[in-house]
Image (cartoon, rainbow, N blue to C red):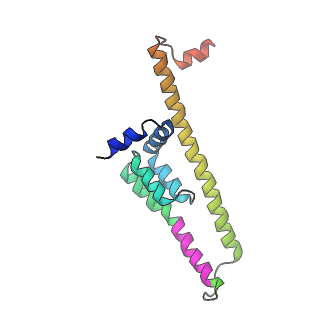
């Protein structure tokens, strides 16, 4: 019942409208990628998803799969901590941990790129719809494709 109230508050934001549309179209992919990224706090992302039209099943599956690497990372961090204080026995060599850190940074870069691209696509589509709507209001019924051919 709060969805209508939230939509009223955010309807003025073109950026949020584009994010909402991108998440409703590519819910699983974006939820998964943002869950893999340590850059967006989970509480903030949960709030964001609550304000969007993300499908619940896509949200749930993306969350389960996306949380797995982070959970393993916390477990490995605990293992490293044990070894540092001398409680642990054996463990992985330093380059395994360095590789894990590099992997997290690479995933963050990929996630940011894919999410930005999805939002840009939705914004471009919304801009095209807006331009076509304005054209139709002014009596110009040509399409953007026809305009490109004529020019």
Residue 80 part of the magenta segment: yes
Residue 68 at x, y percent in the picture: 50, 65
Residue 127 at x, y percent in the picture: 52, 28
What residue occupies the far front of the structure in this picture?
9
Residue 55 falls left or right of residue 18: left
Q: Could you tell me which residue is drawn at 44 percent across and 15 percent down?
A: 137
Q: Could you tell me which residue is drawn at 54 percent across and 56 percent down?
A: 40
Residue 36 part of the magenta segment: no
Query: 130 and 69: which one is in front?
Result: 130
Is residue 148 placed above or below 93 in the rendered structure?
A: above
Is residue 138 placed above or below 58 in the rendered structure?
A: above
Q: Quadrant location of the C terminus?
A: top right
Residue 71 falls left or right of residue 3: right
What residue occupies the far right of the structure in this picture?
95
Is residue 19 placed above or below 84 in the rendered structure?
A: above
Q: Could you tell me which residue is drawn at 47 percent across and 54 percent down?
A: 45
Q: Which residues are magenta?
A: 69-82
Residue 21 falls left or right of residue 85: left
What count of labels does the image hold?
0
Q: Could you tell me which residue is drawn at 49 percent across and 21 percent down?
A: 132
Q: Main secondary structure of the magenta part?
A: helix
């Amino acid at each position: 019942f709060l969805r209508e109230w939230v939509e009223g508050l955010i309807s003025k934001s073109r950026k949020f409208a584009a994010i909402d549309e991108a998440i409703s179209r590519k819910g699983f992919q974006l939820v998964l990628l943002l869950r893999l990224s340590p850059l967006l706090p989970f509480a903030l992302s949960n709030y964001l998803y609550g304000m969007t039209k993300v499908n619940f099943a896509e949200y749930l599956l993306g969350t389960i799969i996306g949380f797995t690497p982070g959970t393993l990372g916390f477990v490995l961090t605990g293992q490293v901590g044990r070894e540092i204080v001398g409680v642990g026995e054996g463990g992985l060599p330093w380059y395994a941990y360095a590789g894990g850190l590099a992997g997290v940074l690479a995933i963050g870069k990929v996630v940011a790129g894919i999410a930005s691209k999805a939002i840009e696509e939705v914004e471009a589509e919304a801009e095209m719809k807006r331009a076509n709507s304005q054209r139709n209001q002014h009596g110009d019924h040509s399409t953007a494709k026809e305009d490109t051919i004529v020019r």
